Image (cartoon, grey):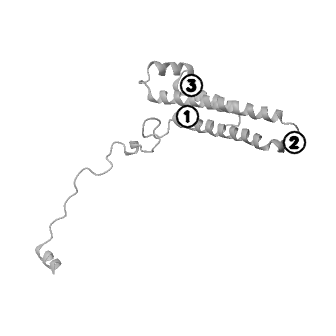
């Protein structure tokens, strides 16, 4: 992910807008009006919303950590546990935001094997078969019957 939190949102929002040719706000309205038109757009809007929520949670966690650090007088070792608790919250919020950003990147990737539907997360993508069945559908040719002399020798 990018170093700056705003960069993550800015870059991914730009990719969403480029992919669908409209602002995220317009895309949200279009998906709300006709969700059946594009399942891909529905998923992208959903995950962009989850990413936005995670980004807000990260910003709140960072603000809380800065607030704790500003109020700790002198020696940080005295209040180590409380500071580490807030730092852990920031790390968890970063992980959550980055995970959601990864999902959104996957959904926006035009080369992804399946970007929506039940097969997207299981890797069960039939596209590699290109319409061919997984197993042969014709019966194989039966071997020719062995001659009578071969059959008698095998019986001995």
Task: Say few, some or many: other residues with alpha carbon within 10 Å of mark 3 (under 14 / 14 to 19 / 20 or more).
Answer: some
Query: Which of the two marks, 1 or 3, is nearer to us in this view?
Result: 1
Q: Marks 2/3: CA distance?
A: 48 Å
Query: Residue at image x 63%, y 40%?
Result: 95
| Sequence-earlier tag: 1 or 2 | 2
- Residue 101 point in image, percent of width and height: 59, 35
Pick the quarter of the image with the C terminus: bottom left
Which SS class for mark 3? Answer: helix
- Residue 89 point in image, percent of width and height: 68, 38
Residue at the right extreme, as displayed: 74
Q: Is residue 23 left or right of residue 59?
A: left
| Sequence-earlier tag: 1 or 3 | 3
Q: Marks 1/2: CA distance?
A: 42 Å
Q: Is residue 1 visible?
A: no
- Labelled pair 1, 3 in contact (Cβ < 8 Å): no
Q: Is residue 65 left or right of residue 138?
A: right
| Sequence-earlier tag: 2 or 3 | 3
Query: Residue at image x 48%, y 20%?
Result: 32
Q: Determine which quarter of the picture holds residue 11.
A: top right
Please give the residue where the numbered disc 2 appears in the rendered image: 75
Please give the residue where the numbered disc 3 appears in the rendered image: 17
Task: Say few, some or many: other residues with alpha carbon within 10 Å of mark 2 (under 14 / 14 to 19 / 20 or more).
Answer: few
- Residue 49 point in image, percent of width and height: 57, 27
- Labelled pair 2, 3 in contact (Cβ < 8 Å): no
């Amino acid at each position: 992910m990018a170093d700056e939190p705003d960069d993550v949102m800015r870059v991914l929002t730009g990719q969403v807008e480029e992919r669908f040719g409209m602002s995220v706000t317009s895309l949200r309205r279009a998906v709300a009006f006709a969700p059946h038109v594009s399942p891909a757009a529905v998923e992208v809007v959903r995950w962009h919303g989850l990413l936005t929520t995670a980004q807000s949670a990260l910003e709140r966690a960072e603000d809380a950590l800065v607030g704790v650090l500003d109020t700790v007088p002198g020696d940080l070792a005295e209040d180590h546990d409380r500071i580490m608790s807030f730092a852990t919250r920031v790390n968890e919020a970063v992980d959550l935001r980055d995970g959601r950003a990864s999902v959104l990147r996957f959904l926006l990737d035009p080369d992804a094997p399946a970007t929506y539907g039940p097969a997207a997360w299981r890797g069960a993508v039939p596209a590699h078969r290109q319409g061919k069945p997984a197993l042969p559908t014709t019966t194989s040719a039966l071997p020719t019957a062995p001659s009578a002399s071969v059959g008698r020798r095998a019986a001995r």
